[in-house]
Image (cartoon, helix red, strand yellow):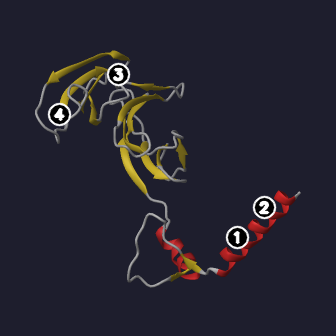
């Protein structure tokens, strides 16, 4: 019984202390010297200007008048499809982590590739999303950093840069879009910064 009263007293005192503080407090990991206190009312009034939605064009469909865009409804950018001019967007991906780029398969447009990392680590992996089934297939190893994924003109292969070989050097790789086991290195490179353009 004594523990219950102690717990209630701590909760009441904490609530009173928080209610009396009308300033935005920095995170305990941040050292803020010489910066004036920021009233909560000011932070709330400018919040509408700092939190907004945006949309980025990602890819045109090869045969229909529709496109993929990246936009944010919650905390991360996800892939949406706009099926005709002026149409509402339809969200296709629902991951806790952001999507970094999306591109329709260039012949039929029945799938699209996209890159995604985990927890902001920037170790991007390449996935293919089947638009008919909604199935998502991982094409890379899940460990290396993969960048600049590009479809072949025939839509059967994907070229990309990857650190798979050494963990540092970005080599050029190719994978069959339907067979992750077909991945092969086509050009070993030295250093980072290499990308596939076309």
Residue 183 x %, y %? 28, 18
Alpha carbon separation for disc pair 2 and 4: 56 Å
User: What residue occupies the far right of the structure in this picture?
Assistant: 1
Q: Nearer the viewer, residue 36 or 4?
A: 4
Residue under label 1, please give it. 14
Labels 2 and 3: the sequence-earlier one:
2
Q: Quadrant of the N terminus?
A: bottom right
Q: In which image quadrant can residue 107 be found?
A: top left
Quick check: can you spot residue 40?
Answer: no
Labels 2 and 1: the sequence-earlier one:
2
Instruction: Residue at 53% x, 77% y: name it.
Output: 43
Is mark 2 in CB contact (under 8 Å) with mark 1? Answer: no
Q: Nearer the viewer, mark 1 or mark 4?
A: 1
Identify the element where label 3 is drawn.
loop
Residue under label 4, please give it. 169
Labels 1 and 4: the sequence-earlier one:
1
Q: Residues within 10 Å of mark 1 (few under 14, many from 20)?
A: few
Q: Quadrant of the C terminus?
A: top left
Identify the element where label 4 is drawn.
loop
Instruction: Residue at 36% x, 33% y: name it.
Output: 125
Q: Nearer the viewer, mark 2 or mark 3?
A: 2
Q: Nearer the viewer, mark 2 or mark 4?
A: 2
Q: Residues within 10 Å of mark 2 (few under 14, many from 20)?
A: few
Residue 86 x %, y %? 50, 53
Instruction: Residue at 52% x, 43% y: name it.
Output: 96
Q: In the rendered view, would you say 188 is above or below 89?
A: above
Residue 193 x %, y %? 17, 42
């Amino acid at each position: 019984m004594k523990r219950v009263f102690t717990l209630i007293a701590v909760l009441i005192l904490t609530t009173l202390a928080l209610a009396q503080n009308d300033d935005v407090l920095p995170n305990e990991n941040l050292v803020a010297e010489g910066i004036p206190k920021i009233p909560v009312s000011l932070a709330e009034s400018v919040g509408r200007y700092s939190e907004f939605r945006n949309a980025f064009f990602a890819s045109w469909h090869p045969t229909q008048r529709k496109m993929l865009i990246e936009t944010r409804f919650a905390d991360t950018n996800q892939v949406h499809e706009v099926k005709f001019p002026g149409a509402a967007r339809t969200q296709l991906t629902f991951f806790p982590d952001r999507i970094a780029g999306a591109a329709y398969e260039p012949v039929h447009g029945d799938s699209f590739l996209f890159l995604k990392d985990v927890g902001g680590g920037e170790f991007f992996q390449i996935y293919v999303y089947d638009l008919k089934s909604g199935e998502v297939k991982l094409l890379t190893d899940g460990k290396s950093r993969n960048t600049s994924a590009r479809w072949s003109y025939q839509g059967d292969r994907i070229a990309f840069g990857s650190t798979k070989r050494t963990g540092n050097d970005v080599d050029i790789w190719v994978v069959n879009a339907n067979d992750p086991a077909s991945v092969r290195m086509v050009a070993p490179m030295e250093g980072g910064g290499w990308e596939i353009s076309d």
